[in-house]
Each structure stands twice: as structure tokens, then as C-alpha cells.
């Protein structure tokens, strides 16, 4: 029989107590106590997954991705609607979970195979492939408690993909080692699908989804927001997330933005930030970025100074420079170009101060955040690029 999944009008709700902690699953037709409410994790979802499909599921935390996988795997049951799954499901919600720490890697392979209903002779036919794929060498006969996290992940991935799952579900589990192993894991998943298997992957890594999957489902607030080709769905998702994050960032750091004039005719506008030609406040590392500071001042006989400082909100200063503005210019623009932007991740504030004869005439402040899709771990890195600056007439 070909593997096949059909989900029709499925909703999954969890009852919470007065403190909003999940307590009981809510089944169709049940009533709730007045002190309880329901959290609906999946809302009226319908979809079909055919034999050989590699399906990626993306979405923010709390979007219903893992609950949907639990429903398909039979770990939980729907509150309403129906799920038909033709084929044996192997579900791995976290690679390495379920391994027996006191048993060796080799013993774990036999134990897992037996749990899946295989005879020892059947496991014998594939165990050498499992061991070779996991790249554990002599550690295969060491207790699993001596393994690193990456070694456990490699063993678990090798086990589940070599014991012939019909429907393989992987939740946030593809970072199973280094880049070379990840590439090998990707090839293994494609091989499974070429033999008519279904693979469902949940990941926050858009590159993983595009590399592995031939279909992508975007979950949002328990519903399917988009279902289609991975490159189209992930692009739409990233853009939607960027817009939401931009809005949230502006609201969160509004106290760090604003402009003030202390003398008539002196004006400093909030800094405009262009990244890849678009105005943004959320900047990916490596993006070509230009900061525009525009001002007006009365004509005078004295030159004025524009002091620009860029600092992270924890106080670490990245850029601190003074620009000279001609006495005759009534309107001016200062540009700071960072091509590419290689600031470390974090939230930054740009403070601009216009001065003449040591007197502060006007100020402005703006905030932006630098993000990285795969941020380094530990500490707060700060990189200092070569920066091009200039003062221009508008």
C-alpha cells in the first residue's frame, strides 16, 4: 500500500485552567468548566500528502507546527475533524531523545529496531550501514552517555532513516552534526522519497526547507497561511516576518527615536536607513547599508559641526565621528556607507548632534537592529568595517 496522509477539517484545542496552563485535551462535544478556557493550536486544517512528497512546515513559535505533527504521528488526537494515515509513521521530535544512555550505540540500534517490530536478522542486514552512516567509529561500542550531542543526533538520524520508515516526521532535527553530515542527511532524505516515502520536516531554517523539500506549508496561528513551492512560500514567510519584526522593533524602541530643535531654523531629521535600496530598521548582517542624516540651518559666517555616534544599546560604541558643514549651506545631507554591514547582532542607536560655536542647536536619535539567520553562540561580537562617509548638498 502506498503511504498517504489525508487531514480533513482538523481542529486541536487544549483546555487550560485559570492560570492559563494547559491541563486537558479538549475532545469534540466536551464542555468546559467555567474556570477553564481553551487554547486552539490547530484550526480547521485540511490537506493531503501523497507518496514521495518531501513536505516542509514553517512558521513562528506557537503557530501550530508541532501540534500538527503530533496529530499526524498519532501522539495526540484531534478535537474535531478526521485524520487518515496510510503507512507506518516514524516520528522524531528531537534527535537523540529516546536513546538509552547506559546502552552502547550498537545496542541502541538493535533495541530501536525491535521496538519497531523488526526481527534481529532484519536489523543485522542494515546495522553496518547504520554504523557507517553515523560516523561514530569505535564509539559505536561505547555507552551513549559518553556521546556528545552531535554524536547522539548522528546515531539517531542514521537509525531512523536506515530502518525503512514509510512516513518519516522530523521536528527541528536536521542540524545533525557538521556541514558535511548535514549534506549527507539531505541526500538520505531524498533517497527515501525517491523510493516512495513521505518525509515531513519542521524547521526554522529556510535553507534546509528549500534544499530538502518539494513542497512547503506555512502555518500561522493554527491555520495554513500558504501551501506551495518551497522557494515561493519561504520568500513570502520571510517578508511577512520582516514586516512584523520591523513594526514591533519601531514600537519597542520608540523611546530611542525622535528629534529636537533648540534654536529657530535648526532642524535635524531622524536618520533614514537604506538597506539594499529599501528603508529598514531591521538589518541582516552583510547587507549593503547607507545611513542618511539630513538637516537644515540658518546661513551664518561660522561652520557648524555634526557629531554622529552609533552605539549598541548596552553602551558599546561602534562609530563616533564629527563632520564639518559649510557655513553657507542651509540644507545638507551626511551619508555613512557600510558596504557590507558587518556589525554584530544587537540593537543600535544613532545619535546626531548639530553644534555651532560649541552650542548644541539640534539633536536626533534613531534605533535599528542587526540580525543574523545563524548567529554565533556566546558573547556579543562587534566587527569594525571600513566606513565611507561624506557630506553632500541635497
Image (cartoon, rainbow, N blue to C red):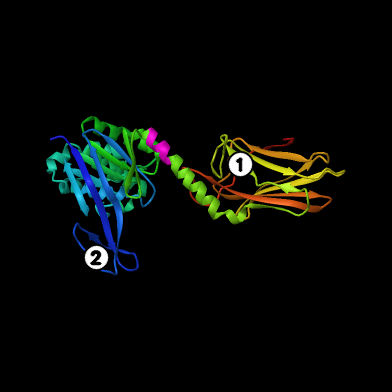
**Which numbered mark, 1 or 2, is in the foreground of this view?**
2
Q: Is residue 234 magenta?
A: yes
Left or right side of 322 for 336: left
Q: Which mark is residue 273?
A: 1
Above-or-below relation of 102 to 162: below
Q: Which residue is mark 2?
A: 32
- The quarter of the picture where the C terminus appears is top right
Q: Is residue 374 visible?
A: no
Q: Residue at x 27, y 56 (%)?
A: 13
Q: Is residue 10 magenta?
A: no
Q: At numbered mark 1, what does the secondary structure look like: helix, strand or loop?
A: strand
Percent x, y of residue 118: 13, 43
- The quarter of the picture where the N terminus appears is top left
Sort mark 1 into few (<14), some (14-19) or many (20+) by Cα contacts within 10 Å: many
- Report the magenta residues as a range: 231-237
Question: 312 or 177, which lies in front?
Answer: 312
Marks 1/2: CA–CA distance: 51 Å
Q: At numbered mark 2, what does the secondary structure look like: helix, strand or loop?
A: loop
Amino acid at each position: 500500500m502506498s503511504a498517504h496522509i489525508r487531514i480533513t477539517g482538523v481542529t486541536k484545542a487544549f483546555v487550560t485552567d485559570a492560570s492559563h496552563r494547559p491541563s486537558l485535551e479538549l475532545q469534540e462535544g466536551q464542555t468546559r468548566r467555567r474556570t477553564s478556557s481553551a487554547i486552539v493550536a490547530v484550526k480547521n486544517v485540511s490537506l493531503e500528502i501523497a507518496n514521495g512528497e518531501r513536505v516542509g512546515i514553517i512558521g513562528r513559535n506557537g503557530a501550530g507546527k508541532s501540534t500538527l505533527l503530533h496529530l499526524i504521528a498519532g501522539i495526540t488526537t484531534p478535537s474535531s475533524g478526521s485524520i487518515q494515515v496510510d503507512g507506518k509513521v516514524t516520528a522524531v521530535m528531537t534527535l537523540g531523545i529516546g536513546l538509552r544512555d547506559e546502552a552502547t550505540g550498537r545496542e541502541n540500534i538493535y533495541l530501536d529496531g525491535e521496538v519497531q517490530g523488526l526481527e534481529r536478522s532484519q536489523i543485522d542486514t542494515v546495522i553496518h550501514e547504520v554504523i557507517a552512516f553515523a560516523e561514530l567509529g569505535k564509539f559505536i561500542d561505547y555507552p551513549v552517555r559518553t556521546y556528545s550531542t552531535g554524536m547522539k543526533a548522528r546515531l539517531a538520524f542514521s537509525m531512523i532513516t536506515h530502518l525503512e520508515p514509510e512516513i518519516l516526521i522530523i521536528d527541528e532535527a536536521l542540524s545533525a552534526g557538521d556541514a558535511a553530515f548535514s549534506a549527507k542527511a539531505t541526500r538520505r532524505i531524498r533517497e527515501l522519497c525517491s523510493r516512495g516515502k513521505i518525509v515531513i520536516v519542521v524547521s526554522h531554517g529556510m535553507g534546509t526547507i528549500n534544499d530538502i523539500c518539494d513542497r512547503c506549508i506555512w502555518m500561522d496561528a493554527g491555520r495554513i497561511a500558504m501551501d506551495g513551492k518551497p522557494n515561493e512560500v519561504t520568500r513570502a514567510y520571510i517578508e511577512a516576518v520582516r514586516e512584523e519584526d520591523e513594526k514591533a522593533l519601531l514600537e519597542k524602541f520608540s523611546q530611542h527615536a525622535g528629534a529636537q530643535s533648540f534654536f529657530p531654523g535648526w532642524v535635524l531629521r531622524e536618520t533614514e536607513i537604506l538597506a539594499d535600496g529599501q528603508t529598514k530598521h531591521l538589518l541582516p548582517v552583510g547587507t549593503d547599508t547607507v545611513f542618511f542624516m539630513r538637516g537644515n540651518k540658518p546661513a551664518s559666517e561660522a561652520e557648524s559641526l555634526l557629531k554622529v555616534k552609533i552605539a549598541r544599546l548596552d553602551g558599546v560604541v561602534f562609530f563616533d565621528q564629527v563632520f564639518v558643514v559649510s557655513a553657507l549651506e542651509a540644507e545638507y545631507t551626511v551619508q555613512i556607507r557600510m558596504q557590507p554591514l558587518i556589525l554584530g547582532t544587537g540593537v543600535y542607536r544613532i545619535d546626531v548632534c548639530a553644534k555651532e560655536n560649541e552650542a548644541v542647536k539640534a539633536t536626533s536619535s534613531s534605533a535599528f537592529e542587526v540580525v543574523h539567520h545563524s548567529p554565533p553562540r556566546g558573547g556579543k561580537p562587534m566587527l569594525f568595517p571600513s566606513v565611507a562617509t561624506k557630506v553632500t548638498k541635497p
